[in-house]
Amino acid sequence: MDTNEKLRILTASAKFDAACTSSGSQRRSFKGGIGSAVSAGCCHAFSSDGRCISLLKVLYTNYCINDCKYCVCRRSNDIERAAFEPKELADLFMSFYRRNYVEGLFLSSGVVKNPDYTAERLLEVLKILREEYYFCGYIHVKAIPGASPELVRALGLLADRMSVNIELPSESSLRLLAPQKTKENVTKPMAQIRDGIIQRTNEIKLFRSTPRFVPAGQSTQMIIGATPDTDYQIIRLSQALYRTYGLKRVFYSAYVPVGNHPALPKDIQPPLLREHRLYQADWLMRFYGFTAEEILSEDNSHLDPLLDPKAFWALNHLDQFPVEINTAPYEMLLRVPGIGVNCAKRIAAARRTAKLTFADLKKLRVQLKNSVYFITCGGKYVFPSYRMNHSFIYGSLTASSSMMPAITEHRQLTMNDDFDSLTPTAEERVKCLTGQF
Amino acid sequence: MPDGTILDGGAVYVYDGSYDGLFTAIFDAVYSRREPEDIVSGNRLQLTFATRYIETAADPAKAARVKKAAREKLGSQAMKRIYHAYLSSGEDREISIYRYLMLGFRMGGKANSHLTDPAVFRVFSLSRNVSREADKMMGFMRFSVMEGGVQYCRFSPENNILPLVLSHFAARFPGIPLVIHDTRRSLLGIYDTAGRYIVSAEGYVPPEKSSDEECFEGLWKLFYDTISIKERRNLKLMKQMMPARYFRHVWER
């Protein structure tokens, strides 16, 4: 089998892994070496599904002894199988890298023979790259569940990021669909990587030569929509993972039907909107100081398809609004729908030197479309304050075009301004639920 | 009129287009106490009757004095910002930099948070625009290995980001000679594994691609097509992430 065929087969098997980020690691090349990594990461192309291509994402092999029902590579699936040679894969990767096609390597694998054997093969590839080619760029490698701790450590010393995929959000789903995988198998390497990172940060203070260990941290992935787990369960789990294992990222991957197990949904469109909302909720937990319990609750266990989670939260906490742009604490600015981290920082910097008006906010390129219902500038609303109730704001936020009157330097709004027709039409609601945006 | 001009349309300072030249012009503007109406590089000059033009010759010593003062007042972050704004294609970049610096000399580091000031905001947004384009380009540029081992890449950025991408790639591939060709400005960025140079590309003909280049391009195209999930096909999103101006060079799409 030639490299062409192998690349095709092993890419097709790897494509369902959502992680393709190259961020979090800073590396510099040295004389005789090649490659570098920037902590912001870098996208090199976007495929026709709109996802970023940053890494050469392939499996070492798609032969697998496991039979996970949701996975294309499961033993019982009748597909083409292939395996790279370590040298062959390393050479292919380097020829892509030097032409600037990719930012790094994402190496995963099906489990051949046993987890240790598989991990050794991955280690071989990484050794060729780091120790023969002196490659100083980004490498993401999977910790094969069940592999021995020594191998996980050896991989971690060469890679930038490691990941162990949880795949399914609850243990019952795992038992049902991935009988050979156990929760233990996943959490053990995760804990080991966490401890390795902590140990490294402690030792670097004493010895400058302490080798890097997974400098870009670890991540994991969950499949969304293959099992009946609720959004609340999912984000609770993510929160627990961020807190207890110090993960850098949890990826969510909308389930694309590839299996025929009776417990799996069939003929469904991948739940892309749900995936999107989960990412938004995830961002709220990582960058905006929200907890999972603030975003959802036991009774209200799914994210609203019409509203992003922050707007949903704000609508249910109108008592905390409006927020005065000139005096509100930074943490509260972050909670205003439509104001992101960059915007909040810009506002916090700008208000130190001048009192901000709505016109200033426009100048600072603050998106007023969604935030205008929740903020005042110098005590003034854009809308008359009697309109600021749940149904008006809900209607405005979900309406297809913005209802916001033009903001100019001198205009004062009057009661006669047109605020009618602010609720979404029936058609819009249907569209939203069927996911046609 | 104290300086003898009859028509007083303000002074326009003309510099040679170099970074030092810009700072020399700013130096001259400050010490001649003639508030500049604009600062333009020589090749962008459009003469009008009502304006008084003041030619300045780049002087590294003068430029260094302004740079040192600016660094002390505004900080090194701001110097990076100013350099990026200088590389942009915004017509008002020089005068915005001048006004930002003047504000900085007056109020010190506080000027950096004076975002409601039009000149400060303009420098910030020009610089953001430049670094954003450079960051994107660093991903979207594609090198070909040519006969003789040189790696060649052609691109046509909106801003003059050649120095930024050249130093990025020179640091990334320290052992590989590189030629980066800016077709819009007709400039060549050259890295010969010892140093980096930027020269004019007039009359430059790139060497032939090496014989196995096609094979690697085919492999990459194969990877690109295979990695996409057809059930998630979303061309609109793809175009949003990879706008048309980058499209030309990303040939695999």
Image: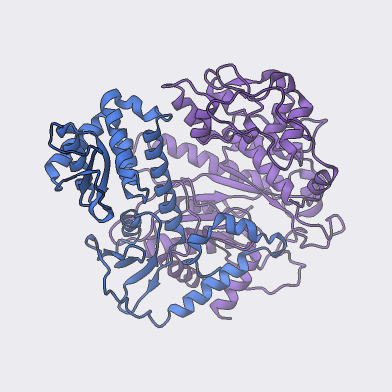
Chain colours: A purple, B blue
Q: Quadrant of the N terminus of chain B?
A: top left
Q: Indicate the quadrant where residue B159 lies.
A: bottom left
Q: Which of the 4 image quarters holds residue A209?
A: top left
Task: Tell which residue pokes out farthest to the right in this image.
Answer: A262
Tell me if residue A113 can be seen: no
User: Residue at coordinates 21% horizontally, 42% vertically from top-left?
Assistant: B23
Q: Nearer the viewer, residue A60 or A120?
A: A60
Q: Is residue A435 above or below residue A366?
A: below
State which quarter of the image contains the C terminus of chain B: bottom right
Residue located 38% across and 58% down the image = A35
Q: Position of residue A112 (x, y in %)?
A: 64, 65
Depth check: give the residue in front, B33 or B228.
Answer: B33
Question: Viewed as shown, does residue A342 lie left or right of B101?
Answer: right
Please tell me whether residue B69 is drawn above or below residue B133 in the rendered image.
above
Residue at 74% in and 30% down: A419
Q: Please, is residue B23 above or below residue B45 in the view? A: above
Whether residue A427 is visible, yes or no, is yes
Residue furthest to the bottom in view is B211
Q: How many marks?
A: 0
Q: Position of residue B118 (x, y in %)?
A: 40, 33
Q: Nearer the viewer, residue B234 or A191?
A: B234
Percent coordinates x, y for residue B141 in the rendering: 43, 63
The residue closer to the viewer here, B46 or B196, is: B46
Q: At x 50% / y 55%, what residue is drawn?
A: A43
- Could you tell whether B129 is left or right of A423 in the image? left
Residue A241: percent from the left, percent from the top? 63, 38
Residue, far front: B6
